[in-house]
Image (tube, rainbow, N blue to C red):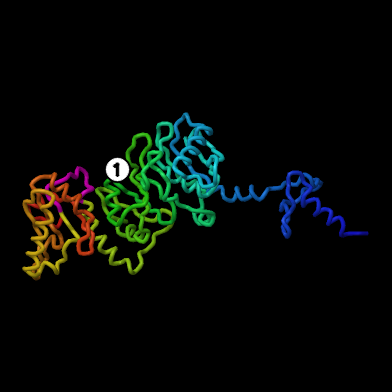
């Protein structure tokens, strides 16, 4: 009895005689599904390699679209996002529509939009906030998105070359908010505007992405935001410096969104210390009812050591008068000096008093963020009553 031949026939059958299948690759089984008792060979469930690949990459090829209007349906969503992806140059998988499937939850007004490729899904993340049928929609990663696994499948960030202006979006406005360096900023007072929150965060450097989360019905802040810095090395510094800061009746919670608290590296400690010393000044601008004043307070301009010598002090005063006078009528310049054996409030700050708020506003715009002696100047409005009373440590 030939016991070998039936096995050879079986493998020959599996290799190419099932309708719709292709010959097996040498060294590989054409299917890994077990046979049910009595099941004919022709009924074998066969999953093509392409289908297996699509299943494995689906979490990285889908995007969550929230805040859909009631009129939205699968076809309108698919058509809209395919057209928009083409308009911004986000199609990287060749000609045709980028969207291959849409699932809508009408009750909760969201959809999962499946793209052809991982790269196209990442490009779609730049569409956050786009207007669809008259309403801005949120574009996010779905809850089953695995950043670590997705990183092995393709780009996880939108291409920097997308033409977002073609669809009325601004690069970096809310996109670029994925990955391990995304920061959660919680405990924000509800009266903080988007501009105020950005200004506080941008003390540590320019942002690649920012999103102040708002209530869709009222447009009011929900009290938390997300951001990503262009320079990822400042992520932990910003978290450590801002976390626990008191803002009105709130306390900020600032941490990486995707993992536990990270401590700054030793080489970052000096930067962190300086940052913590300067945050109090930024808070002056973020209190309820804060308005522009005629007085500007500059930090990062002088050090206490530079103010001890009389000649050096006069030179600095002259420089400040000349620099500050470029923006309008300068009434007064005050630079507190160190005092022997006693604390002197305001040492290290420069105060510029202008004849009008317009000049002070121009000065703030012109001086804030400028480099001075290798340091970045911080310019904030200062309360006029405190300045008049000689209170320089506010």
State the residue at coordinates (12%, 52%).
326
State the residue at coordinates (42%, 49%).
161
Magenta residue check for 24: no
Q: Residue 389, image x and y in percent? A: 7, 53
Q: Furthest residue to the right? A: 1
Residue 177 seen: no
Q: Furthest residue to the front? A: 95
* Range of residues picked out in magenta: 284-296
Q: Residue 317, image x and y in percent? A: 9, 61
Image-based side of 140 in relation to 380, left or right: right
Q: Nearer the viewer, residue 389 or 19?
A: 19
Viewport quadrant of the N terminus: bottom right
Q: Which residue is mark 1?
A: 190
Q: Nearer the viewer, residue 21 or 383?
A: 21
Q: Secondary structure at mark 1?
A: loop
Magenta residue check for 294: yes
Q: Nearer the viewer, residue 231 or 351?
A: 231
């Amino acid at each position: 009895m030939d016991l070998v031949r039936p096995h050879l026939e079986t493998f020959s059958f599996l290799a190419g005689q099932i309708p719709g299948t292709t010959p097996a690759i040498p060294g590989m089984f054409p299917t890994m599904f077990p046979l049910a008792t009595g099941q004919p060979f022709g009924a074998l469930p066969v999953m093509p390699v392409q289908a297996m690949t699509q299943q494995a990459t689906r979490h990285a090829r889908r995007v969550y679209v929230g805040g859909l209007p009631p009129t939205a349906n699968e076809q309108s969503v698919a058509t809209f996002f395919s057209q928009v992806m083409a308009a911004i140059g986000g199609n990287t998988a060749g000609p045709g529509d980028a969207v291959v499937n849409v699932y809508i939850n009408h009750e909760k007004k969201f959809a999962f939009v499946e793209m052809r490729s991982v790269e196209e899904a990442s490009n779609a993340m730049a569409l956050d906030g786009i207007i669809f049928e008259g309403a801005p929609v949120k574009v996010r990663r779905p809850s089953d998105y695995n950043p670590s696994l997705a990183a092995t499948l393709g780009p996880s960030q939108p291409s920097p070359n997308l033409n977002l202006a073609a669809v009325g979006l601004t690069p970096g406005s809310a996109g670029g908010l994925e990955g391990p360096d995304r920061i959660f900023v919680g405990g924000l007072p509800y009266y903080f505007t988007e501009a105020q929150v950005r200004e506080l965060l941008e003390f540590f450097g320019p942002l690649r992405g920012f999103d102040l989360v708002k209530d869709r019905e009222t447009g009011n802040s929900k009290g938390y935001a997300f951001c990503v810095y262009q320079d990822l090395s400042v992520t932990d510094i910003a978290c450590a410096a801002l976390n626990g800061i008191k803002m009105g009746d709130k306390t900020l919670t600032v941490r990486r969104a995707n993992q536990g608290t990270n401590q700054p590296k030793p080489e970052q400690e000096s930067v962190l210390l300086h940052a913590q010393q300067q945050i109090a000044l930024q808070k002056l601008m973020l209190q309820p009812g804060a308005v522009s004043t005629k007085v500007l307070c500059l930090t990062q301009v002088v050090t206490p050591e530079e103010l001890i010598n009389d000649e050096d002090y006069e030179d600095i005063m002259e420089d400040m008068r000349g620099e500050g006078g470029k923006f309008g009528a300068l009434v007064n310049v005050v630079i507190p000096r160190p005092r022997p054996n006693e604390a002197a409030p305001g040492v290290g700050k420069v105060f510029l008093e202008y004849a009008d708020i317009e000049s002070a506003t121009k000065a703030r715009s012109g001086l804030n963020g400028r480099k001075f002696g290798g340091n970045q100047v911080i310019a904030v409005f200062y309360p006029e009553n405190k300045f008049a009373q000689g209170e320089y440590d506010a």
